[in-house]
Image (cartoon, grey):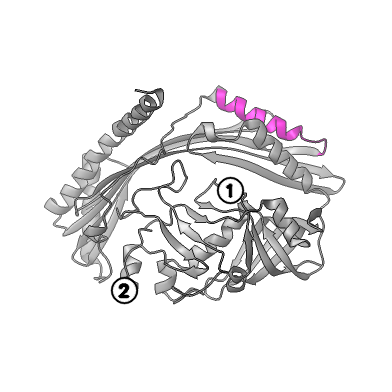
Amino acid sequence: MSAAKDMQQNLQSDVSEISAPLLDVVEQAMHDAVSRGGASSAEVDASLSQGSSMTVRLGEIETVEHNRDKSLSLTVYFGKKSGSASTSDMSAEAIKNTVDAACSIARLTAEDECGGLADAEQMATEFPDLDLWYPWNPDSDAARDIAQECEEVARNTGDAISNSEGATVSSHEGVGVYANTHGFCGTRYGTRHSLSCSVIASNGESMERDYWYSIARDRTDLQTAAEVGRIAGQRTLNRLGSRKITTCQTPVIYEAQVASSLLSHLISAISGGSLYRKSSFLLDHKGKKIFPDHINISEQPHLLKAIGSAAFDNEGVATRQRSIVRNGVLMDYVLDSFSARKLGMQTTGNAGGVHNLVIEPGDNDLPALMKRMGKGLLVTELIGFGINNVTGDYSRGAAGFWVENGEIQYPVSEITVAGNLRDMFRSFVEIGNDLDKRGNTITGSILIEQMTVAGE
């Protein structure tokens, strides 16, 4: 057997060892709910997680945190009545009391025709290995050394770096078991590690801060401490001397790490809760064109090592790769079983949210996008949250850089970018190939044809 196979087998053994007591807890809760409590159906979720975090500031340890959490949540159904309860105590007596609490609540609630478990035929039956388990748990000395190196590199990037908000190393791992009375029982697990740094630069009366971070399932996939520090320091220096600009209509590029927010507004508008409450600017837009022809957006829940990967959602429904936007047309919504029933539709396997939202990139990187834009604004930071999900009106504070002749001219701050999301979506000119894969949304920088930029 190869070394890689040996390692993977050991990792799976770790997960099995951690999940074994959770399986016993879930089984007891399910049995109590149905056999003793008289529930017609039930679902149980039990989880264990642990992690650590260390922050170093100005070369000294500032904070050290360790956490270990456990939880059990239970929902019982008496026909169309439901009740939920949770606990962090997994003793037999605590489980019994939690079941009793959930049953008492359920008997007092009104019936809801759209409630209940997701349909049995939609339960996941295959559980592919998505390569998500890479425990790290660095000791204090190792974490301190990494954070110190990261911050030191950032502070030494230039003489104008005058202060630091610190560098942080974090490691987290978690295992959970979800089961319901359809006979479904699934184990989810994953690790997440990160390294971040934020520093401050000053030049006369001008003072700016910026940051950088790296996140990965496997610590060997993290950017090095030197890389994170160097990028954090350089981004901070680049912002010195920022100024306001005159209010104008201009093309705008959203840098990849802030471009994901635009897609989050899309998901909010096509999520079941917004749709059945009729509080979305994309109500009844399924099958309609909302982007230009070249825009394709998909959900890809089975990407190896990706932050959002999962074999099943929070209701046990199988996740699947699907098109959400194809050739600019909205193909599907984002629904759990409750909202789907409210809308007379089928769940899309999104209880708990989307799993790896991916927008198809074009051929150009960020510098090439700026060349194509010629003159306009590059947004690198967004501030505040001025979004109206009903009308699509959009207004957010921003900072970034003014671009002319395809080149950055100077940094800008204290500005507002505004428009309407309907118009903004239709004005996606190109998606960069500088994909940011650090989160649940994977996108490159986005060039928008025109927005209002409010300044002086």
Q: Is residue 66 visible?
A: no
Q: Residue at x 66, y 65 (%)?
A: 448
Q: Residue at x 71, y 53 (%)?
A: 368
Tell whether 443 sits left or right of 273. Answer: right
- Earlier residue among tags 2 and 1: 2
Quarter occupied by the N terminus: top left
Residue that extends furthest to the front in the rendered view of this protein: 363
What secondary structure is found at the residue carrying circle 2? Answer: loop
Mark number, residue 436: 1
Q: Is residue 446 visible?
A: yes
Quadrant housing residue 453:
bottom right
Nearer the viewer's eye, disc 2 or disc 1?
Answer: 1
Separation of residues labelled 2 and 1 (CA atoms): 36 Å
Residue placed under numbered mark 2 in the picture: 344
Q: Are marks 2 and 1 in contact (CB under 8 Å)?
A: no
Q: Residue at x 41, y 51 (%)?
A: 301
Tell whether 79 sits left or right of 357. Answer: left
Across and down, in percent, residue 394 comes to 62, 69
Q: Which residues are magenta?
A: 142-160
Across and down, in percent, residue 395 comes to 65, 68
Q: Amino acid at mark 1?
A: Asp
